Every structure is written in C-alpha cells, then in structure tokens.
Image (cartoon, helix red, strand yellow):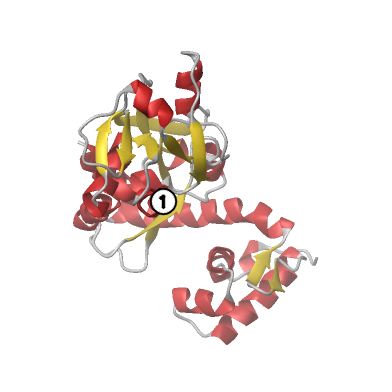
Amino acid sequence: MSQMNIDKIDLNLLKTFEALHDESSASRAALRLGVTQSAISAGLRRLREVYGDQLFVRTGRGLAPTVRANQLRPVISEALDRCRHSLAMVNPDNQEYQGRSVVLGLSDDFEIAYGRRLMAAIAQRAPKLRVIFRQTHSQIVAAALLDRSLDLAITAGGFAQGRLSRQVLGEGDYRCLLDSDQASIDLDEFVTREHVLVSSGGFIGITDEGLAAQGLSRQVCASTSHFAALPFLLKGSQAVATIPGHAAQAIAEMSGLRVVPCPLALPRYPVELGWRTQAQLDPLLLKVREAIVASFI
C-alpha cells in the first residue's frame, strides 16, 4: 500500500465503501448513490489501492466484505455520520430526508405489534426518511449497535454497556395464543396441550423455566425462530404458544386466533430503547427516538 495523505483522497470514496458494504452489490450501490455502475467499479479500484486490500470479493450472492473491510466499516461509518451530524446541526428543522435511512433493530414480535405504528410516527416527524427494520435480540443487540449495524434498537434489555444509552419504553407480559373459542385455559389443560415454542435456540423457553419451578413440564411439538410463523403453525391445531402479549394481540387481530391469559405466573420484563451514547445529539436520531417513544405510549 502506498503512503496516502487525506488531501490526495476523494472523500466520496468513503460513501462508495459504505454503500458497497451495506448493499453487497455494485449495481445496488450505484442505485443508492445515484451514479453509474462503472463509477462504483472505478471507486472500488481506488479504494483497493488506498487500503491495500481487496475489500470486497465476488461470491455467488454478490460482493462479500473481507476481514479488513469489516474492520473499516465502523470507522468509516462513524466519520460519515459525524459529517451528516454537522450538516444537520446547521438546520435541525430541515424536513427533507429523501435518500436518508435509519436502521432500527428489533425482534419480529415488536415489528409485528409496533411496526406500522412506528412507520407512521417516524414519517410524521421525518418525511421521506426510510426506516430499515433489522432483526436482533437482547443477546446480540449491544454488539450490533457498537459495530454500527444498527442505529437504534428495541429489545427486552441487553444495553448494559458503557458506550450505550437506554430508555424504558414500557413493560411486557406473556399471554397464550391458540385456535379456540374458549376465553381461558387452566394450568392442567395448559400442561396437557402440545406447545409451539418461539426461540432462537429452539429448545428451552421461559415457559419451561416457569413450569420447572413448579415441578411440571410440557410437550413441545414444534419450535420456530419467527413469531410471524405462528398463525400458520397454530391454525387448525390444538397447540398453544406462550408469547409476549403485544405480539399475541397483534397476531390474533390479523389471524383470528384467540388470546387468553397465561395460567402460569411468568415475570414481566422491561421494553427498552437503546442507542450509542456518542450519537445521542444527532438531530435525526432524536426525532426518530421521539417517534418511537410516542408509539409506545
């Protein structure tokens, strides 16, 4: 790699790098930046010279970042974010957000229950801004925020890291979802029925822990990592799913399934919004945070 001085580098190359890393495709990066694909290819050649690395290698599914590219991504994104922040400071009341986006991490139970509401609240405060919903959960959310894969995140915790800030949005509970007309289910029937488990691991959930504390267990007939699959798995069956109440209510309203109280005492949990402390004064993110808080009131 030749010695480089920032005075000799076109800083637009950093935008090319960011677009390539996010889109994994030269054609999509070109569309995103409003330039030709040949301009993106020329930019990538220059980036490779600057950083002395291939940065992106072609695979059957597009362009994959190298280890060096993944190391550079948070550094370059932070530099670009600071530039965007500086421009926003000049006119924090600017209402033109065409071409800008915010990545919001959340699990699909929150997306199902609050996604449409979030879209409307964000559009009201930041017209034409694109909100990108990206799947996450409390075990991985801190790392995703710190490596800038996410701008903001909504989870049941996971923000206990020195460089992250958080705000409690509310409190969640658990309810049962089933294909039945009955208004309730007792603990004996709950244990007797088969269960559909929603879990990233696929084996143990909080319901199993609650039952074990009473010397009980259940029969799980199927597990899935997606709440959105539940209408298709429960409809026409005798199985029950115990899931966060906000998701149970939203799914029931769309699918005709029934929500009933959970007969097992399960702990409530905080619903939190998290973000990088360093970005907390960004006018755009402040508007999006306001929209998120309003959606949970």
Of residue 32 and residue 244, the one placed in the foreground of this image is: 244
Residue type of the residue flagged with mark 1:
Leu
Task: Indicate whether 198 appears above or below 65.
Answer: above
Can the viewer see residue 57 in this picture? yes
Label total for image: 1
Provide residue 225's location: percent of width, then percent of height. Answer: 50, 46
Seen from the viewer's position, the closer of residues 165 and 24 is 24
Q: How far across and down, in percent of the image, does residue 256 sit?
A: 23, 50
Q: Residue at x 37, y 47 (%)?
A: 237
Quadrant of res 22: bottom right
Residue 143 in picture, x, y percent from top left = 57, 40
The residue most toward the top is 214
Q: For this view, does 199 lie left or right of residue 54?
A: left
- Measuring from the top left, give residue 94's x and y in whole percent: 24, 59
Please determine whether, in this image, residue 63 is positioned above or below residue 275.
Answer: below
Image side of residue 35 versus residue 172, left or right = right
The residue closer to the viewer here, 1 or 41, is: 41
Would you call the spot at circle 1 few (<14 residues within 10 Å), some (14-19), or many (20 or more)? some
Quadrant location of the C terminus?
Answer: top left
Q: Is residue 92 visible?
A: no
Query: Could you tell me which residue is drawn at 72 percent across and 61 percent down?
Result: 66
User: Which residue is painted at 63% across and 62% down in the image?
Assistant: 6
Classify the position of the N terminus by image quarter.
bottom right
Question: Would you name the residue on which mark 1 appears?
Answer: 233
Q: Is residue 232 left or right of residue 78?
A: left
Per the image, label 1 sits on a secondary structure element best described as helix
Near-viewer residue (51 or 223): 223
Say which residue appears at 77% left-offset and 63% top-offset.
3
